[in-house]
Image (cartoon, helix red, strand yellow):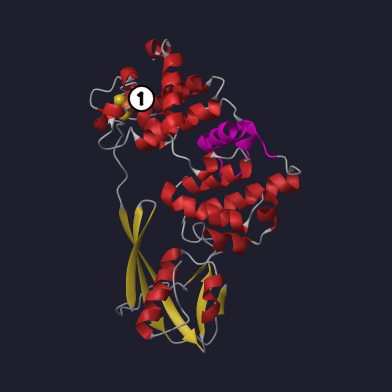
């Protein structure tokens, strides 16, 4: 690495010049307002750029300022996030807005150590906000940058080893100590997103190929064994009564505050009315839905919702999809669509 840093100024110059000509104009790159940058960073944590762009604009129309978000109701926030999944990000974004507006008198933190105290903000996100919004020389290492750096340094050790992680953060930290941190971090990310691709990296047009030590770039980064995908079954029931559907407000960590079909402790041996699958972290979940008579009494956290108002109820996508499928099968005109 020491050898590489003798050429760091040329490396930065080449990469920055390439980015200024070829970098994509993404909506959160044309602002230095920390609020939209925070929104984009939390959305991008688990979601592709193309999907985030749509949600990002919609979000800022709905909550144009940090203040608007801080004052919004929790269910309004979850509803606006609906379709992006991983709802903890929405809850954390809401909490961040409340802390900054009500506890910090709207003063947005600009230093990495202050940003790290906000909920849902880890080392990468803190560095991204500090550099993109405040032009601070804060390092960032996301999966794109991790891939670029392991290839440039030709690191053969698995990147999920602590000491390799430390090497990458050290590199990113030295790299960004310059007069244009915002530009430099954006350029490194863009290289990973558009040129140094996981499969078939475009080395022939790479602006920093003369600095790159990778002999077999596609084999990098190396990882220790991947986690096994596990199967899971969740059973729920669908009960209707006088134009209403029974839903249950989740108290679980994953979907806290969202409305789902009521759960069945165990399946009763019948065939489900419908089944669908969805992925979540390291699981593939089979969601089984059984038709049920309306229960005489409703359980804790359960409420009958009017079918025609279902669009204004925050629901996780798999459950909204199940209701939509059921609607198609049993002809419920009001119980329509997933957004
Ligand atoms: S030369 Fe190839 S492997 Fe090296 S940084 Fe560029 S795209 Fe990645």
For the view shown, which residue lies furthest in the right direction? 105
Question: Whole-percent x and y of residue 218?
Answer: 25, 32
Q: Residue at x 72, y 40 (%)?
A: 107
Question: What SS does tag 1 mark?
Answer: loop
Q: Quadrant of the N terminus?
A: top left
Above or below: residue 88 compared with residue 246: above
- In the picture provided, is 305 more to the left or to the right than 225? right
Q: Residue at x 42, y 15 (%)?
A: 10
Q: Quadrant of residue 22?
A: top left
Residue under label 1, please give it. 207
Q: Mark 1: is the Cβ under 8 angstroms from ligand 1? A: yes
For the view shown, which residue lies furthest in the left direction? 216
Question: Whole-percent x and y of residue 23?
Answer: 43, 35
For the view shown, which residue lies furthest in the bottom direction? 242
Instruction: Tell me which segment is drawn in magenta.
Output: 108-134
Closest to the observer: 188 or 301?
188
Circle 1: is it few (<14), some (14-19), or many (20+) Cα within 10 Å? Answer: some
**Quadrant location of ligand 1?**
top left
Above or below: residue 121 compared with residue 2: below
Question: Whole-percent x and y of residue 158?
Answer: 32, 29
Q: Is residue 157 visible?
A: no
Q: Residue at x 64, y 53 (%)?
A: 64
Q: Is residue 179 visible?
A: yes
Q: Residue at x 43, y 79 (%)?
A: 238
Q: Is residue 258 magenta?
A: no
- In the picture provided, is 183 more to the left or to the right than 327? right
Q: How many marks?
A: 1
Question: Whole-percent x and y of residue 168?
Answer: 42, 25
Above or below: residue 198 compared with residue 317: above
Above or below: residue 177 compared with residue 219: above
Closest to the observer: 299 or 85?
85
Q: Is residue 121 magenta?
A: yes
């Amino acid at each position: 690495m020491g050898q590489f840093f003798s050429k760091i100024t040329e490396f930065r110059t080449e990469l920055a010049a390439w980015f200024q000509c070829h970098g994509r104009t993404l909506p959160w790159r044309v602002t230095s307002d920390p609020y939209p940058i925070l929104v984009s960073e939390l959305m991008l944590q688990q979601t592709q750029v193309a999907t985030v762009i749509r949600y990002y604009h919609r979000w800022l129309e709905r909550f144009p300022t940090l203040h608007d978000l801080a004052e919004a109701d929790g269910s309004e926030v979850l509803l606006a996030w609906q379709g992006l999944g991983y709802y903890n990000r929405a809850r954390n974004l809401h909490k961040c807005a409340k802390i900054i507006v009500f506890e910090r008198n709207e003063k947005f933190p600009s230093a990495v150590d202050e940003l790290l105290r906000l909920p849902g903000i880890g080392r990468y996100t803190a560095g991204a906000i500090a550099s993109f919004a405040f032009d601070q020389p804060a390092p960032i290492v996301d999966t794109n940058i991790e891939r670029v750096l392991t290839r440039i340094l030709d690191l053969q050790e698995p990147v999920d080893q602590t000491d390799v992680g430390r090497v990458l953060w050290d590199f990113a930290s030295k790299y960004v100590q310059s007069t244009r941190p915002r530009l430099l971090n954006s350029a490194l990310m863009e290289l990973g997103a558009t040129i140094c691709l996981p499969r078939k990296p475009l080395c022939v047009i790479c602006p920093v190929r003369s600095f790159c030590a990778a002999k077999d770039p596609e084999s990098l980064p190396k990882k220790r064994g991947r986690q096994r995908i596990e199967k899971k079954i969740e059973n729920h029931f669908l009960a209707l009564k006088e134009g209403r559907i029974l839903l249950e407000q989740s108290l679980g960590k994953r979907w806290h505050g969202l409305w789902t079909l009521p759960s069945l402790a165990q399946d009763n041996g019948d065939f489900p009315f419908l089944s669908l699958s969805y992925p979540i972290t390291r699981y593939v979940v089979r969601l089984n839905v059984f038709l049920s008579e309306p229960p005489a009494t409703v359980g804790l956290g359960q409420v009958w919702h009017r079918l025609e108002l279902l669009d204004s109820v925050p629901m996780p996508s798999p459950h909204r999809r199940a209701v939509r499928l059921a609607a198609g099968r049993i002809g419920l005109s009001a119980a329509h669509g997933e957004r």
